[in-house]
Image: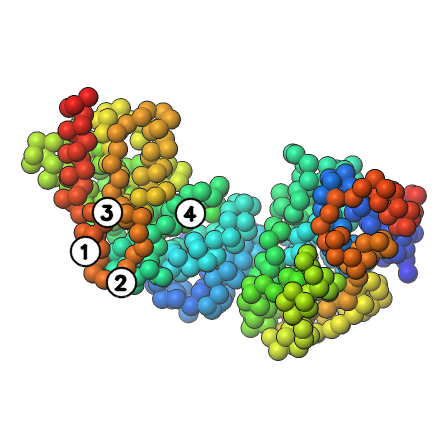
Amino acid sequence: MQIKQTEQTYSYEEIARAVRYDVIDMIFRAEMGHPGSSLSCVEILVALYFGGILRVDPDNPDWPERDRFVLSKGHASPTLYSVLSRRGFFPRELLSTFRKTGSILTAYPDMSTPGIDMESGSLGNGLSTAVGIAMSSRIRKLDNYVYVVMGDGEQQEGLIWEGAMSAAHHHLDHIIAFVDRNRLQITGTVEQVMRISPLEEKWRSFGWNVQTIDGHSFDEIFAAVEAAKAHRGSPSVIIADTVKGKGVSFMENELSWHRREITPEEYRQAMEEIHAPEELI
Amino acid sequence: MSNLPVRMIFGQEVIRLADEFDYIAVCGDTKCCSFEDFGSLYPERQVSIGIAEQNMLGVASGLASCGHKVVLSTYSTFITLRACEQLRTYICHPKQNVLVMGTHSGLQSGSEGVSHTAIEDIAILRAIPNMTIIQPSDGVSARILARKALEFNGPLYVRLPFDAVDDINCPDTYQVEIGKANWIKRDGRDVTLIATGILLMRALKAAQLLEQEGIHAQVMEIHTLKPLDREAVLQAASETGAIVTIEDHSVVGGLGGAVAEVLAVERPTPMRFIGIQDCFARSGDAEALYRANRMTAADIVAAAKDLVEAKKCR
């Protein structure tokens, strides 16, 4: 599969490798971050930003009619910063300043950073803000979409469901939300810590259009977004089954990699496995 | 006496100005200040959220991020306690243009009791960067501040009391500039009474009583609790060297704290604090609650005399 809307010839899979390279590099240099949570949503963000889904203009990041993106699971900020820099919202050199004093690349997304549409970090808040954004578009008669990426642990926050109820009540069919269902949270599996299943039924009962996909399959992500856009009258949620730490064998499904620093040896091994295209790093 | 409670005068004025100021309302399901009528008057400019304050503030943040001025109202406790994080991180940090009307502040809420009465809202919000906090002292100032609040750009909290009060300010001459203190009684060099909100009336009453005893008190109104008019406070301290702060709020972290923070560094000055004595509100008669917390005009007089006596001993 080739990139749409750009003249590059890299596949989405190659771009995803390059983004994973950035994620590991940023967290290694910052000596702290959330590798597992950042790696599980790489394909979703690459699809949104490189697959022609999000209508955004890096040269005019405040373009009022742009689609919006809300990273409700703000601890995956390295992934977002990587795709934003690779789309040209800010120079890639800045990635090495992640979490450092004075950097615009704060631990969690900050609206003063080019390309960041909404504050984030504290879990459970993104969907409510997306409701406000979608209401604004309705009031202004704009046809833009707002995309949200939530975590699955985050589904335990009550505010998620206040947001879900209000989006359905107001028939906000221009909200397309993802749940990055990697099934792990910081102290255990989501089902052990606080059961959220049956997740599809919960969202359906709140009045949402629900799809479940393989969150690492670009084909499935594109198809689900297309179906969500075709759906009218209620918001859509795409529950994306993912692997926490995806792309680095020793991080995959490994609880300790939710939040951790990376040692030089782990860094070397991770980069070897990721094997990003030379020209993209 | 204005016929309406101050909160309703403010809410109705915001609605009255709706054609002049292009704002969107996010409506929770409370009847708190008449602003809840906005939705039926301007259905295309309101978002109904129901009983979900965190969502209400989150939705407000989303709307404001798209460039709207957003107005919302509910009980102050529900905003400053339940939805405090949404206000702090999603509205104040990115300096979003949201006007928050918080009602049922102070013991004047009377029988509403602990869950519905805000006694610590100023203390909470004063600690949040980028926040501006204002409070009318009567119906006259409520009307003028409503316009100022709509003209304002940024996170703004308006603290509104429960009941009707006598008008003390003159509609023809009363002026307000957010961030500037108002001198209500400028003469007097013995003591300064610095009041905020509806207790300004008690401060004026206390000044009259003090005058009868030969003590000349200045009276200053602080309608903007943050940013505090530091220069005015320092001016008062230099003129009288004795300051009583008066507020329908906890003595912890409110007006008294704000004034003390300035004076402690710039010009240490003896002070007394009139306010809620670090205890929860209770259900009951407002006046009885004020008495229990030593917040009557007589209590202000006693505090002022105490300071004046202390000055003599220095």
Which chain letter goes with mark 1?
B
| Left or right: residue B162 compared with residue A5 | left
Q: Residue at coordinates 44% horizontally, 65% vertically from top-left?
A: B28
Select label 2 or label 1 by which is in front. Answer: 2
Indicate the secondary structure of the residue bearing disc 2: loop
Select label 3 or label 4 by which is in front. Answer: 4
- From the top left corner, tell me how far across and down residue B270 is, in percent: 26, 29
- For label 3, count other residues whose C-alpha is less than 10 Å away and answer few (under 14), some (14-19) or many (20+): many
Which callout, 1 or 4, points at the residue further toward the start of the chain? 4
The CA span between labels 3 and 1 is: 12 Å
| Left or right: residue B43 compared with residue B169 | right
Q: Are circles 2 and 4 on residues that touch, CB within 8 Å?
A: no
Give the number of callouts: 4
Question: Which quarter of the image is occupied by the N terminus of chain A?
Answer: bottom right
Q: Any mark on residue B283, and which?
A: 2
Closest to the observer, B259 or B186: B259
Which callout, 3 or 2, points at the residue further toward the start of the chain? 3
Q: Residue at coordinates 36% horizontally, 66% vertically from top-left?
A: B31
Which callout, 3 or 4, points at the residue further toward the start of the chain? 4
Select label 3 or label 2 by which is in front. Answer: 2
Q: Residue at coordinates 66% horizontally, 52% vertically from top-left?
A: A74
The CA span between labels 3 and 4 is: 20 Å
Residue pointed to by mark 3: B199
Select label 2 or label 4 by which is in front. Answer: 2
Residue type of the residue flagged with mark 3: Leu
Indicate the secondary structure of the residue bearing disc 3: helix
Indicate the secondary structure of the residue bearing disc 1: helix
Which callout, 2 or 4, points at the residue further toward the start of the chain? 4
